[in-house]
Image (cartoon, rainbow, N blue to C red):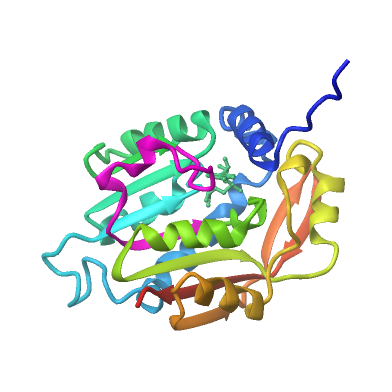
């Protein structure tokens, strides 16, 4: 009998987040995400000069790519400052929830919509070559880079989707030894999806610069601790924002 082939990290992410999307209690951390969108919204002018409430973005199209968008909380909270957001996620049920929650909030599909996709696939699938999925002013990857098999490939592929001067913003855990192992121990439900124990500033700068996104690179550690409960265990993370623009 041929040896069973282990599912890839990407396949595990798709399977786990597809299942969990319709049962957010199993994610165990949904309430904690409020802090993420609060920090994101209040830092938006540090992240990018172009939003609908800035001189650079007033009366202009301001297009946001929310990659690995999950439920779309960040897209919905940035909605007043953009003209259009497109979410992309591996997990069909996450995409379904992104779209359902946006409609429930009264935001039309012309403004916020998500689709299933994996930019890390080789070759990139045809449906991700849709011209709508290029020329973004801002791309964000919030709390997801540590789930990706190849963060450099992800950042390279996101850089291709930005317009000249467009900005990538990543939010993730500041590296600390053992974070991934702690997550796996406390939350078997999502254990198979976690790949890295966060990132250092040097690592992030290298990832951005290698992708041609080193212009104005900046790394900011969030002072407020990110607290969440995993199966009843309170854990605290230090998170960062990294931003850089395409030359
Ligand atoms: C912890 S959630 C973060 C969701 C969202 N960014 C937020 O802030 O709420 C991680 C998400 O990454 C998605 N994901 C994992 N690997 C992916 C990949 N290669 N491409 C696209 N999405 C991916 C999962 O399906 C999941 O929805």
Question: Image height check: is 246 above or below 35?
Answer: below
- Horizontal placement of 77 versus 185: left or right? left
Residue drawn at 25 percent across, 46 percent down? 131
**Residue 144 lies in the magenta stretch:** no
Residue range highlighted in magenta: 117-142
- Horizontal placement of 106 versus 41: left or right? left
- Horizontal placement of 20 versus 104: left or right? right
Residue drawn at 69 percent across, 60 percent down? 227
Residue that protrudes farthest toward the top in the picture: 1
Expressed as whole percent of the image width and height from the top left, the position of residue 231 reads: 79, 42
If the image is split into quadrants, where does the C terminus sit?
A: bottom left
Residue drawn at 73 percent across, 52 percent down? 195
Expressed as whole percent of the image width and height from the top left, the position of residue 91 reads: 54, 34
Residue 52 appears in view: yes
Expressed as whole percent of the image width and height from the top left, the position of residue 30 reads: 60, 45
Expressed as whole percent of the image width and height from the top left, the position of residue 179 reads: 80, 61
């Amino acid at each position: 009998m041929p040896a069973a082939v282990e599912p890839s990290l990407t396949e595990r992410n798709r399977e786990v987040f597809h299942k969990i999307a319709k049962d957010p209690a199993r994610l165990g951390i949904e309430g904690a995400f409020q802090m993420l969108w609060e920090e994101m919204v209040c830092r938006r002018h540090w992240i990018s000069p172009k939003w609908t409430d800035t001189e650079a973005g007033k009366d202009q199209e301001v297009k946001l790519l929310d990659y690995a968008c999950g439920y779309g909380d960040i897209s919905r909270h940035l909605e007043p400052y953009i003209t259009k957001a497109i979410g992309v996620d591996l997990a069909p049920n996450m995409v379904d929830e992104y779209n359902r929650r946006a409609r429930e909030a009264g935001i039309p599909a012309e403004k916020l919509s998500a689709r299933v996709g994996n930019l890390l696939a080789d070759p990139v699938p045809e449906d991700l070559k849709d011209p709508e999925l290029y020329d973004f002013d801002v791309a964000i990857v919030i709390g997801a880079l540590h789930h990706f098999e190849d963060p450099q490939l992800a950042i390279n592929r996101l850089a291709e989707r930005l317009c000249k001067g467009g900005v990538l913003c990543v939010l993730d855990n500041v590296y600390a030894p053992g974070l991934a192992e702690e997550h796996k121990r406390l939350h078997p439900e999502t254990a198979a999806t976690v790949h890295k124990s966060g990132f250092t500033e040097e690592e992030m700068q290298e990832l951005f610069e290698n992708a041609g996104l080193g212009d104005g690179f900046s790394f900011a550690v969030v002072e407020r601790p990110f607290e969440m409960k995993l199966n009843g265990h309170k854990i605290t993370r230090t998170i960062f924002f990294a931003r850089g623009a395409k030359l």
